[in-house]
């Protein structure tokens, strides 16, 4: 019963995070404030009330429409909030937390994992919409990396040099990207993917990061194959000129790989 309450709390935290992620994904590329500016309907610009901002509940209660202009609200907002809640619960389950014998290390890791997933969801959302990585989110990722290094080194000091190298490379690439592209505010695709890989190397591990890249490439290959088959059946010429949101695929793959690895370690390997 107590463990059920814990996972209900994680689900509630997840859907509220998901609601914030949709807001941040929309506002960050527009350089809008994500903390002090009141939420509003993107169609009629009407300020939203408390009852309009209940994750999942407001969408269902309002039947997927804005209370003020009656325009439909994209179902992706509802699905994103639901997905985030499920991911948070699965992450908690994967850690095999014993509520009666709480381990401080696992609870700290749970908190850091939530912060890490927050960055991945933001990177994935913005990359999917704008096909770029928002530098402010990357800076947040650097902070999470530092917090994770401090946590990890309290458990095993031997890893401090490895983490220092990864973090140093990440900061150097971020500095190069910022200096070289500060005039037009663009980012270099290769550099930003390298930064993301280093970020995953720090917070997860080498195996998870490598399988993340491989899994992402596999997913993209399958998607291209399905698009080719679809265009062939419809007798349309298939062109593969569209830039793929690789960071989006990598973030989703990394979440799956990390949770799957935790389940494997905590439930199957004795």
Image (tube, rainbow, N blue to C red):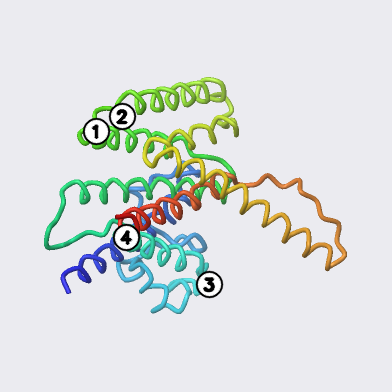
Give the left or right position of residue 184, taking residue 237 as reference: left
Find residue 159 and name its label: 2
Circle nearer the N terminus (2, 3): 3
Using a 10 Å C-alpha cutoff, classify the residue at mark 2 as few (fewer than 14 neighbours), some (14 to 19) or many (20 or more).
few
Q: State the CA–CA distance, disc 4 to disc 3.
A: 43 Å
Q: State the CA–CA distance, disc 2 to disc 3.
A: 51 Å
Seen from this angle, which residue lies furthest left?
100
Circle nearer the N terminus (2, 4): 2
Q: State the CA–CA distance, disc 1 to disc 3.
A: 52 Å
Where residue 85 appears, as percent x and y from the top left, is 36, 64
For the residues bearing labels 2 and 1, Cβ distance under 8 angstroms = yes
Where residue 160 appears, as percent x and y from the top left, is 29, 26
Seen from this angle, which residue lies furthest front?
270
For the residues bearing labels 1 and 4, Cβ distance under 8 angstroms = no
Where residue 257 appears, as percent x and y from the top left, is 45, 52
- Say what secondary structure mark 4 lies in: helix
């Amino acid at each position: 019963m107590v463990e059920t309450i814990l996972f209900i709390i994680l689900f509630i935290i997840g859907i509220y995070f998901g609601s914030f992620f949709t807001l941040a994904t929309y506002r960050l590329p527009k350089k809008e404030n994500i903390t002090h500016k009141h939420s509003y309907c993107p169609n009629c610009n009407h300020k939203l009330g408390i009852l309009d901002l209940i994750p999942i509940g407001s969408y269902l209660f309002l039947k997927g429409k804005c209370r003020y202009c009656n325009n439909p609200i994209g179902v992706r907002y509802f699905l994103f909030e639901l997905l985030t809640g499920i991911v948070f619960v699965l992450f908690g389950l994967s850690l095999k937390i014993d509520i009666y014998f709480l381990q401080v290390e696992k609870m700290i890791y749970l908190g850091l994992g939530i912060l890490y997933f927050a960055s991945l969801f933001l990177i994935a959302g913005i990359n999917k919409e704008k096909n770029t990585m928002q530098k402010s989110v990357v800076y947040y990722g650097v902070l999470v990396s530092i917090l994770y290094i401090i946590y990890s080194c309290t458990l095993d000091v031997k890893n401090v040099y490895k983490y220092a190298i990864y973090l140093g490379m990440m900061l150097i690439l971020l500095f190069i990207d910022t200096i070289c592209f500060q005039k037009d505010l663009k980012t270099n695709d290769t550099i930003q993917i390298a930064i993301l890989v280093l970020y995953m190397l720090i917070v997860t591990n080498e195996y998870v990061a490598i399988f993340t890249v491989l899994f992402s490439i596999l997913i993209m290959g399958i998607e291209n194959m399905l698009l080719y088959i679809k265009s062939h059946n419809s007798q349309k010429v298939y062109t593969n000129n569209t830039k793929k949101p690789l960071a989006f695929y990598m973030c989703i793959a990394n979440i799956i790989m990390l949770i799957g690895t935790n389940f494997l370690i905590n439930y199957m390997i004795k």
